[in-house]
Amino acid sequence: MYTKYLFLISILTITVVSLSGCKQLESQADTKVVTKCPGKDKNFSITFLKANNRGKEDKRGINHVIIFNPKSAVLDFKVNVGLAHQLYAKDARGKLRKEYVPKMFHELISDNNSKLNGLEPLAAINADYIDINNKPQGLNISRGVEYSGEFKNKRSSFGISGGKPQQRLATIQAGRRSNNILNYNIVGGNGRFYRNGRFKDICKDLGEFACKQATNRSIAAITNQGYVILLVNDLKANSDIEVSDLNQELLPNMFDDVLTGIANNNCLGNIQEGILFDGGQSPRLYYDKKIYFLIYKKD
């Protein structure tokens, strides 16, 4: 018998909000990029691809990648949290209910709280995780409503602002942002390895286990042109893939190579900010009705 290995507390979900957007995105499914350089297409919204560790598109690449434009009018965003009730629900006194429960990734992307205006998510990535008391760790805000843990002001988090689509900004920083419109959709994270365009090898910051042993990676990066890259690398869950210099587990000193390659090959600009989401045993990515990397263990 097999059971899911780890419970999650929050995910970032991406939803298509118009029928015209759905038609546009259907042509981009199944790892195909409509244009060779999405960053040069003014109508580009979102795509999925596989890449090797140099950031080059490769059908057998170990890195599963979602690239999207936060300003796209056909996309909208939401943070889903593991709760025993509806998101944003209040008690009889008008106080926000926060009854956290352990949920698996497939539950977080399929329960009613994952829907936005009745629409199911097109894409999602894991972000924060729960502690032993079933509470979140970092800063989690879903469409302006906060569900956060004790490290919300210490750990960096990834956010997508509110406002009109053309005004949306993706941000990475620790704690709440000074401009409140930026505190609309935020998910708690972990180590930050790009800051203001400068890359840092955070191996020492992570420690020996997280750096070299728990090497399943869940990553978010923002370019100076405002595009977002979501990446999951999990060689151990893909035993059929031949290990090579271009297809192997990602150590922190390799983050720059793969993300810079993805940005350059897709004309997205330069990497400006980068963050690890919860990794170790829980990298998860969802795109177009497919879940990538659910980890199991034998009882």
Image (cartoon, rainbow, N blue to C red):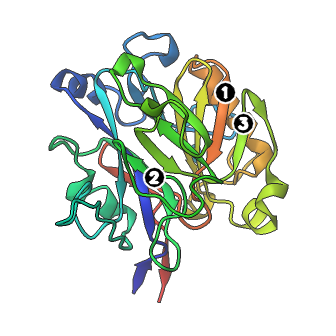
Image marks 1 and 3: residues in contact by CB distance under 8 Å? yes
In the image, 233 versus 73, the foreground residue is 73
Amino acid type, mark 1: Ile
Q: Which amino acid lies under the numbered mark 3 shown in the image of this protein?
A: Tyr
Q: Residue furthest front?
A: 93
State the residue in front, 190 or 254: 190
Mark 2: few, some, or many residues within 10 Å (few <14, many ≥20)? many
Q: Is residue 268 above or below residue 154?
A: above
What residue lies at 76% left-to-right and 52% top-to-bottom?
A: 251
Q: Secondary structure at mark 3?
A: strand
Residue 239 located left or right of residue 38: right
- Of marks 3 and 2, which one's residue comes earlier in the chain? 2
Give the x, y percent position of residue 42.
41, 9
Q: Is residue 63 above or below residue 20?
A: below
On-image quarter of the N terminus: bottom left
Task: Find disc 1 in the rendering and name its residue.
Answer: 271
Residue depth check, mark 1 versus mark 2: number of the one nearer the observer: 2
Q: Nearer the viewer, mark 3 or mark 2?
A: 2
| The image quarter in which residue 278 lies | bottom right
Residue 166 appears in which quarter of the rendering?
top left
User: Can I make out residue 127 in this image?
Assistant: yes
In this view, the residue farthest toward the bottom is: 299
Q: Position of residue 47 (x, y in %)?
A: 42, 30
Q: Is residue 97 above or below residue 141?
A: below
Report how far apart the C-alphas of labels 1 and 3 lie in the structure: 8 Å
| Left-right relation of 115 to 220 | left
Residue 140: mark in rendering: 2
Q: Is 216 placed left or right of 96 in the picture? A: right
- Residue 161's disc is none
